[in-house]
Image (cartoon, grey):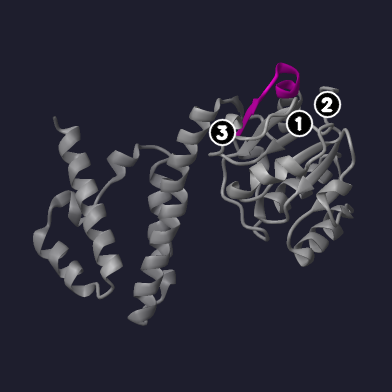
Amino acid sequence: MKNEIQQISIIGSGNVAWHLAKNFVELGVNVSHIYGRTPKHVEELCTETGSINTRSISELPKNQFVLICTPDDSIASICDLIDDSCPVAYTSGSIEISSLPQRTNLGVFYPLQTFSKHIELDLSTVPFFIESTNEEFTQALFILASKITDTITLANSQERSELHLAAVFVNNFTNHLYQVGAQICEEQEVPFELLRPLIAETAAKIESITPKEAQTGPALRNDKTTLQKHLDQLRDPVFKNLYLTLTESIQKNDEYSKL
């Protein structure tokens, strides 16, 4: 295969596919075909990128690079449906190459970032992680990523999986805590917007100090009266258990660091 990928077929029409497809086109890489399970979303993305709305994976061009941007659980079954002549990469952080059907050219093109379809994102600041089954395809994926960003790392499946796990904590779980806070505000008829400066400052702190150094709050101080008051205020048992678990984790981490 040629080391520079100039033609791409994309499988998927969700958040990751939306951002990568549009970015490829802006960079002069042709996204010729898009296939996805939601016709409306595929049509919207094809309109944005000038791509062909493909009705079946079997209709994707032969001998052309295919990028799978779908949920993890569907990657293996999709790989089985792609013509053997096509080099294939996927955007998942947690799926190991060895767990997928064997192909001559199989790789990973993993952007470590959170994507929301209609939220503008500067991909030039996003780290990409590359892995593949052979050196030539690795180089091709590296060159493709270099069109997007300067931050490219070769990472094996184990390293990528550990990064993905850490990312779930700092992104997905953190965002869920925002949702919990928003629900509490809504129940008490307090504007969630009042918390936005606090959220912004919390994120800004770790630009200059470690998360451990930035930790504050009643759990760290072991303010028992406040901790019990908060537990009494939480009516949802799931939120109450979450509060207890996080409090215990903060306190154990603080105790460990003092050893």
Q: Is residue 1 visible?
A: yes
Please name the amino acid that badge 3 sits on.
Answer: Glu
Q: Are marks 3 and 1 in contact (CB under 8 Å)?
A: no
Q: What whole-number distance in Å separates the C-alpha atoms at marks 3 and 1?
A: 21 Å
The foreground one among 106 and 52 is 106
Q: Which of labels 3 and 1 is toward the front?
A: 3
Q: Which residues are the magenta region? A: 128-139
The dot on residue 96 is: 3
Q: What whole-number distance in Å separates the C-alpha atoms at marks 2 and 3?
A: 24 Å
Question: Residue 244: where, in percent of width, then height?
Answer: 21, 58
List the residue tagged with mark 1: 144
Q: Quadrant of residue 236?
A: bottom left
Q: Quadrant of residue 189?
A: bottom left
The foreground one among 72 and 240 is 72
- Judge whether 90 appears above or below 43 on screen: above
Precedes in sequence: disc 2 or disc 1: 2
Q: Residue at 53% across / 39% down in the picture?
A: 94
Q: Are marks 2 and 1 in contact (CB under 8 Å)?
A: yes
Question: Residue 85: where, in percent of width, then height?
Answer: 84, 31
Quadrant where the N terminus sits is top right
Q: How many marks?
A: 3
Q: Is residue 147 visible?
A: no
Question: Residue 20: where, in percent of width, then height?
Answer: 72, 46
The foreground one among 230 and 160 is 160
Q: Residue at 56% across / 33% down in the picture?
A: 96
Horizontally, residue 247 falls left or right of residue 22, namely: left
List the residue tagged with mark 2: 4
Precedes in sequence: disc 3 or disc 1: 3
Binning the other alpha carbons within 10 Å of mark 2 as few (below 14), some (14 to 19) or many (20 upward) gives few
Q: Regarding mark 1 in the picture, which secondary structure is present there?
A: helix
Precedes in sequence: disc 2 or disc 3: 2
Horizontally, residue 207 falls left or right of residue 41, namely: left
